C-alpha cells in the first residue's frame, strides 16, 4: 500500500484530497499547521510549522509521493515575510528532504496568480504563457516553481499544478466567504478595503450601499474598465 505525504492536509483542498486518497486505498501522512480533520486507521498527522523543530526526514521516510498542497495566501503587505517562509523556504526544505529520501514524485500546488489570471493580455490562458505575477503571493508561487524545476534537474520527478480560484458553489454564493465574499459582494469588499487600510476606497464603496440587501459587484481594470475574468475550479 503506497504511502503519501500530504502537506496542507487540513486545508480546503488538502482535506478533500486526504479523504479521496484514503478511500482509494492509500496510506496518508498529513502535515499541517492546523489539527487533523481526518480520522482513519491509515491516516497519521503531524501538526507543525516548518519553522518549528520537527523530524521532517521521518515524515518523508517510506513515502512514494509528496503532494505539497500547503501554502499561505494573503494580499496584505504585512504578511509578505511570512508568505515567503511558508511558500518558498518550506518548499525548499520539503524538496531537499524528498530528494534525499528518493521519493518517486513531488507534486507542487502552484497558482494561476503566476500569470496572473486577472490581468491576462491573451485569452484563454494557456500553460505556455509568460509568468509575470503582480502579487507577492504570485511571486512566492513562481519562486516555488523555480525550486521545483531545479530539483527536477537534479533527478526528482516533479509535477506543477497551477490552480485557479478554487471554490465550491456554496462558497461562491456566500457573502461571508473569506475567498469569494470580497470578489463578488459589496459589503465584503468594503470590509476587505478597511482591513487593508484603504479607507478612501471603503468610503467610496459605502456610498453605494442601500437597504436592498447584499449587493453584488463587478470588478474591472482601472484603465480599460473591462471586467476581470475569474477562473474558478470546483
Image: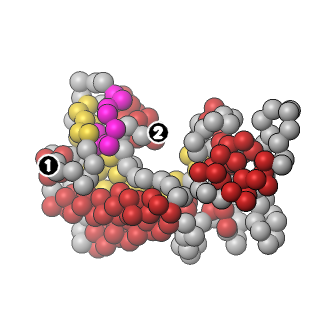
Q: How are the colours assigned in the image?
A: secondary structure
Figure check: 60 above or below 111: above
Residue nearer the viewer, 81 or 100? 81
Disc 2 crowd, CA 10 A, few/some/many (<14, 14-19, 20+): few
The span shown in magenta is: 30-38
Image quadrant where one finds the N terminus = top left
Residue 84 percent coordinates (x, y): 38, 64
Residue 227 on the magenta segment: no
Q: Residue at x 26, y 39 (%)?
A: 47
The CA span between labels 2 and 1 is 25 Å
Judging by the rendered image, the residue that carries numbered circle 1 is: 55
Q: Residue at x 85, y 33 (%)?
A: 211
Residue 32 on the magenta segment: yes
- Specify the label residue 21 is tagged with: none
Figure check: 95 above or below 214: below
Discs 2, 1 touching: Cβ within 8 Å: no
Horizontal relation, residue 131 to residue 37: left or right? right
Judging by the rendered image, the residue that carries numbered circle 2 is: 12
Q: Hey, which quadrant is residue 19 in on the image? A: top left
Q: Which is the main secondary structure of the residues drawn in magenta? A: loop
Q: Residue at x 86, y 32 (%)?
A: 212
Q: Hey, which quadrant is residue 155 in on the image? A: bottom left
Q: Hey, which quadrant is residue 186 in on the image? A: top right
Q: Earlier in the sequence, mark 2 or mark 1?
A: 2
Amino acid at each position: 500500500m503506497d504511502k503519501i505525504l500530504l502537506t496542507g492536509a487540513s486545508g480546503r483542498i488538502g482535506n478533500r484530497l486526504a479523504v479521496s486518497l484514503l478511500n482509494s486505498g492509500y496510506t496518508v501522512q498529513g502535515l499541517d499547521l492546523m489539527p487533523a480533520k481526518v480520522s482513519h486507521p491509515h491516516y497519521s498527522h503531524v501538526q507543525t510549522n516548518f519553522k518549528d523543530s520537527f523530524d521532517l526526514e521521518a515524515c518523508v521516510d517510506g513515502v512514494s509521493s509528496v503532494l505539497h498542497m500547503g501554502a499561505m495566501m494573503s494580499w496584505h503587505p504585512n504578511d509578505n515575510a511570512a508568505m515567503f517562509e511558508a511558500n518558498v523556504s518550506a518548499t525548499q526544505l520539503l524538496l531537499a528532504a524528498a530528494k534525499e529520501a528518493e521519493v518517486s514524485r513531488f507534486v507542487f500546488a502552484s497558482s494561476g496568480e503566476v500569470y496572473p489570471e486577472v490581468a491576462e493580455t491573451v485569452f484563454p490562458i494557456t500553460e505556455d504563457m509568460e509568468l509575470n505575477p503582480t502579487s507577492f503571493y504570485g511571486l512566492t508561487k513562481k519562486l516555488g516553481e523555480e525550486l521545483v524545476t531545479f530539483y527536477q534537474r537534479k533527478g526528482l520527478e516533479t509535477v506543477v499544478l497551477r490552480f485557479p480560484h478554487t471554490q465550491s458553489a456554496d462558497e461562491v454564493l456566500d457573502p461571508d466567504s473569506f475567498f469569494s465574499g470580497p470578489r463578488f459582494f459589496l459589503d465584503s469588499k468594503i470590509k476587505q478595503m478597511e482591513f487593508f487600510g484603504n479607507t478612501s476606497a471603503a468610503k467610496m464603496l459605502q456610498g453605494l450601499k442601500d437597504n436592498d440587501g447584499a449587493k453584488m459587484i463587478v470588478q474591472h481594470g482601472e484603465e480599460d474598465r473591462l471586467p476581470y475574468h475569474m477562473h474558478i475550479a470546483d
